[in-house]
Image (cartoon, rainbow, N blue to C red):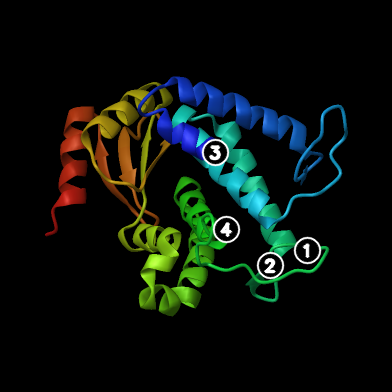
């Protein structure tokens, strides 16, 4: 729901306020001393620890929140939770849904709602570009290759995973600039460029200008936003 509210804020900004408030309350009440909990009852201390899907959908919400407000605290917590999820729920090369009780491997097929594993892959791809981490990228790659045959045979049943594969194939772009310039850049990009796999991060190097990078290299360096956008459009829309 929180991720949906952040996306709906593109139509009406009021939804972002609801999303941020909800997400911050969730973290304050359910992420305690390094442990995420499944739920909390009024005037009670949470006791039931989170399952894999809780971790993964909270990470997604934090990444969507970061995309909206560029608050790096969201990004830091997202990374913490994704890494903790791996420590708890990745056993013998397989992701399981619960570490304590009767556990089963999670499916990449969508059901009544989106596949936890497919969202997990997307989280890894987003964290990979935001932290410029080949390790995270390879985590996503491993799961994609493991299930690629199933997805190719019946893509309609794996729509969330198909999006993850498209993100892997075409690649995320990380746009970097000084923070004051980054907010302007993000607004301009989202008004003019149609490409679903773009993330943003503030650069601490004042001399770096505006950059567009993929996981393995940076492709565009510019000082002027208009010049940068022209080059970015050419890079995204036209093949040499």
- Mark 3 or 2, nearer chain start: 3
**Residue 97 in picture, x, y percent from top left:** 69, 63
- Mark 2 or 4, nearer chain start: 2
Name above or below for residue 223 compared with residue 141.
above
Q: Which residue is mark 1?
A: 99
Distance between the Cα atoms at labels 1 and 4? 15 Å
Left or right relative to 27: residue 20: left
Distance between the Cα atoms at labels 3 and 2? 23 Å
At 54% from the left and 45% from the top, the residue drawn is 60
Neighbour tally class for label 3: few under 14, some 14-19, many 20 plus, Cα within 10 Å: few
**Residue 126 in picture, x, y percent from top left:** 47, 50
Asked if residue 172 shows in the view, the reply is yes
Asked if labels 3 and 4 touch by Cβ distance under 8 angstroms, the answer is no
Distance between the Cα atoms at labels 2 and 4? 10 Å
Q: Which residue is mark 2?
A: 96
Camera-near label (3 vs 2) is 3
Distance between the Cα atoms at labels 1 and 2? 7 Å
Q: Which residue is mark 3?
A: 1
Asked if residue 224 shows in the view, the reply is no
Name above or below for residue 71 compared with residue 83.
above
- Mark 1 or 4, nearer chain start: 1
Q: Which residue is mark 4?
A: 116
The C terminus lies in which quarter of the figure? Answer: bottom left
Q: Nearer the viewer, residue 111 or 127?
A: 111
At 21% from the left and 49% from the top, the residue drawn is 236
Left or right relative to 93: residue 12: left
Label 3, secondary structure: give it.
loop
At 60% from the left and 32% from the top, the residue drawn is 73
Label 2, secondary structure: give it.
loop
Distance between the Cα atoms at labels 4 and 3? 14 Å
Left or right relative to 176: residue 24: right
Neighbour tally class for label 4: few under 14, some 14-19, many 20 plus, Cα within 10 Å: many
């Amino acid at each position: 729901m929180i991720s949906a509210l952040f996306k709906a804020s593109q139509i009406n900004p009021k939804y972002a306020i609801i999303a941020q408030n909800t997400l911050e309350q969730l973290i304050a009440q359910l992420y305690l001393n390094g442990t995420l909990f499944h739920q909390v009852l009024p005037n009670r201390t949470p006791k039931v620890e989170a399952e894999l899907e809780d971790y993964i959908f909270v990470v997604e919400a934090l990444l969507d929140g970061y995309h909206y407000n560029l608050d790096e605290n969201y990004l830091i917590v997202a990374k913490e939770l994704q890494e903790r999820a791996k420590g708890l729920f990745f056993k013998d090369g397989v992701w399981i849904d619960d570490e304590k009780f009767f556990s089963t491997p999670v499916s990449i097929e969508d059901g009544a709602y989106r596949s936890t594993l497919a969202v997990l892959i997307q989280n890894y791809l987003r964290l990979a570009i935001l932290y410029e981490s080949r390790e995270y990228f390879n985590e996503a790659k491993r799961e994609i290759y493991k299930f690629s045959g199933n997805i190719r045979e019946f893509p309609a049943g794996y729509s969330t995973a198909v999006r993850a594969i498209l993100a892997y194939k075409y690649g995320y772009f990380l746009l970097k600039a000084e923070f004051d310039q980054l907010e302007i850049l993000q607004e301009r990009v989202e008004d003019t460029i149609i490409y679903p796999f773009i993330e943003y991060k503030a650069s601490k190097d004042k001399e770096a200008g505006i950059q567009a990078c993929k996981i393995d290299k940076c492709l565009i360096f510019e000082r002027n936003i208009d010049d940068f956008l022209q080059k970015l459009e050419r890079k995204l829309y036209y093949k040499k």
